Every structure is written in structure tokens, then in C-alpha cells.
Image (cartoon, rainbow, N blue to C red):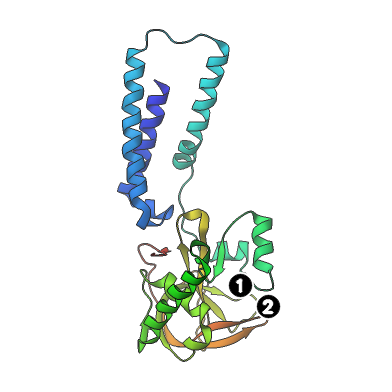
């Protein structure tokens, strides 16, 4: 009977995340069909457990059986307690400040940090190379870059944000001088009062491989506080960042306007 209630809880939890619109805070919505499939399977398993409970004549009384049952129930309850007991929050510049920001593959620093943290969190540049062979990744990113390089003005949207950022960081010299329009939240560079980053948190597959992606920006005297959402227009340049010891693609701002936070602040990688 307890298994029936737990499985029903899983079903209700997934249904709640879907109806409330909070599912996109956990996974890339392009894989939402997996959540729907698990919801259906959980419901079916709950019905099976209900049937077994009704047909069961006598419960086993052996101590070992009881311990096994209690252990399995406790393990099943953990994700439910996490889902129902902890509120979902949007990641913002506070998270960036707490985690720090590190340019991927900067003298091996990113690899060392990930080994220490036991995570695959990425910074600044989305990197999907692990999901392809080396040659196919290069071919695909070459096609993506060529597609946007042909555009007179590159309009960065929630749908194409991740692939554009990846292309810019893969081919920074080719994007120099390109006009770009984008939306992001401000993270003021702690090492340079005249620079800020424009970020968005992105998800490749699920929250476990999420990261903070965006561009360094310069060229505007107006300074917004951290977490301010802005619409920005400008051109891509290369700027050497002293602390990161890297030449970063930089948005030389021409327009910089405060806006309301998007309904969904996250962006996702579309394959």
C-alpha cells in the first residue's frame, strides 16, 4: 500500500511540475517527453502496486523482509521529499559570485575546478563537443557559425542563445565587427569597474549540466546593479581580460536598456 502511495506521489509531482510550468527549471524542455513518459509509467506501476496489495493475502512477517521494505520505501521517498520540501529558485548573479566564473580550458583551470567540484558546470561558453565526435562537432559548429555570419544583424533569442554563444567562442575572430542584439542579466565584473558581463543560465540536457553563458560588455557609462535584466545592442570585439588571462569576445555596447525579467529566464541547447 505504501508503494502505491509513493508511486502516486511521483505521478502527482511530475504532473504538478508540468501544470505549474516549473518543469523547465529542471530539464531542457526538448526532453520533456521523457518526463511525460515516466509520469505515465509511474501511474501504471502505481495501479500494479494497488492490484498486488488488494490481492495479497498476508504480509510477510520476517524481520529481514520488513527491513528491506523499509529501506526501499525510504529511498523512494527521498526525491519526493526534495521535490515537495525545497522551493525552486531562479539562479542569478549571486550564484555567479558564489561559484566564481572561469573561462573554459583556460590553462587547464576549468578542468581542475570541475575535478574539485565533481561537476560539469560550464562558464561563459557552452561546450557540447562531448556529445559528438571531433570531426562532426567541428563540421556542425562550422555550419552554425556560417549561418549567423551571413546575417547583417545577429538577433539572439531564447531559442538560439546557446548555439550562437558557442559559435562566437569557437570562432571569435570571425565574429569581430558583427552587430548583435541580445538580452541578459548584468553581472558587474568584480575586477574591473568599467566592465560587466551579460549572462543567462543555460541547460544542455538537465540542471546537472547547466552553466552561466554570455559575453563581457564594455562601452556604456550607465551602470546597472547585478541581476538587472537588459536589452543590449552593439558589435563584437575582442578584449583581453586580465584576471581570466584570455582574449574574450566582448559586446561593445551601443544601446543598453533595462527590461523586465523574461517569463522563463533559462535558455536551452537545441540539437
Q: Residue at x 57, y 15 (%)?
A: 64
Residue 1 in percent (x, y) is at 39, 20
Judge left or right: residue 147 versus residue 191: left
Judge left or right: residue 134 versus residue 155: right
Q: Residue furthest bottom?
A: 177
Residue on which the image places disc 2: 243
**Residue 256 appears in the picture as rendered:** no
Residue on which the image places disc 1: 103
Helix, strand or loop at label 2? It is loop
Q: Which mark is residue 45?
A: none
Nearest to the observer: residue 233 or residue 247: 247
Residue 231 in percent (x, y) is at 40, 78
Q: Earlier in the sequence, mark 1 or mark 2?
A: 1
Instruction: Judge whether 125 appears above or below 149 on screen.
Output: above
Measured in 3D between alpha carbons, the distance from the residue under mark 1 to the one under mark 2, in whole angstroms, is: 10 Å
Q: Around disc 1, counting alpha carbons within 10 Å, would you say few (fewer than 14), some (14 to 19), or many (20 or more)?
A: some
Residue 137 in percent (x, y) is at 48, 70
Amino acid at each position: 500500500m505504501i508503494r502505491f502511495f509513493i508511486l502516486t506521489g511521483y505521478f502527482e509531482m511530475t504532473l504538478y511540475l508540468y501544470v505549474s510550468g516549473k518543469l523547465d527549471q529542471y530539464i531542457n524542455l526538448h526532453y520533456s517527453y521523457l518526463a511525460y513518459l515516466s509520469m505515465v509509467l509511474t501511474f501504471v506501476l502505481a495501479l500494479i502496486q494497488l492490484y498486488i496489495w488488494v490481492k495479497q493475502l498476508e504480509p510477510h512477517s520476517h524481520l529481514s523482509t520488513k527491513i528491506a521494505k523499509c529501506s526501499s520505501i525510504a529511498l523512494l521517498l527521498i526525491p519526493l521529499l526534495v521535490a515537495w520540501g525545497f522551493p525552486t529558485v531562479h539562479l542569478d548573479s549571486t550564484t555567479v559570485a558564489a561559484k566564481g566564473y572561469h573561462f573554459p580550458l583556460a590553462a587547464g583551470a576549468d578542468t581542475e575546478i570541475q575535478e574539485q567540484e565533481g561537476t560539469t558546470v560550464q562558464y561563459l561558453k557552452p561546450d557540447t563537443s562531448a556529445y559528438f565526435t571531433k570531426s562532426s562537432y567541428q563540421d556542425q559548429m562550422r555550419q552554425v557559425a556560417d549561418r549567423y555570419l551571413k546575417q547583417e544583424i545577429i538577433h539572439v533569442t531564447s531559442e538560439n542563445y546557446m548555439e550562437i554563444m558557442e559559435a562566437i567562442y569557437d570562432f571569435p575572430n570571425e565574429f569581430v565587427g558583427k552587430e548583435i542584439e541580445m538580452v541578459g542579466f548584468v553581472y558587474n565584473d568584480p575586477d574591473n569597474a568599467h566592465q560587466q558581463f551579460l549572462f543567462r543560465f543555460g541547460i544542455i540536457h538537465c540542471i546537472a549540466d547547466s552553466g552561466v553563458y554570455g559575453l563581457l560588455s564594455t562601452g556604456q557609462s550607465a551602470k546597472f546593479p547585478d541581476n538587472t535584466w537588459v536589452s543590449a545592442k552593439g558589435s563584437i570585439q575582442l578584449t583581453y581580460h586580465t584576471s581570466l588571462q584570455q582574449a574574450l569576445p566582448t559586446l561593445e555596447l551601443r544601446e543598453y536598456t533595462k527590461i523586465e525579467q523574461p517569463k522563463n529566464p533559462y535558455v536551452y541547447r537545441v540539437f
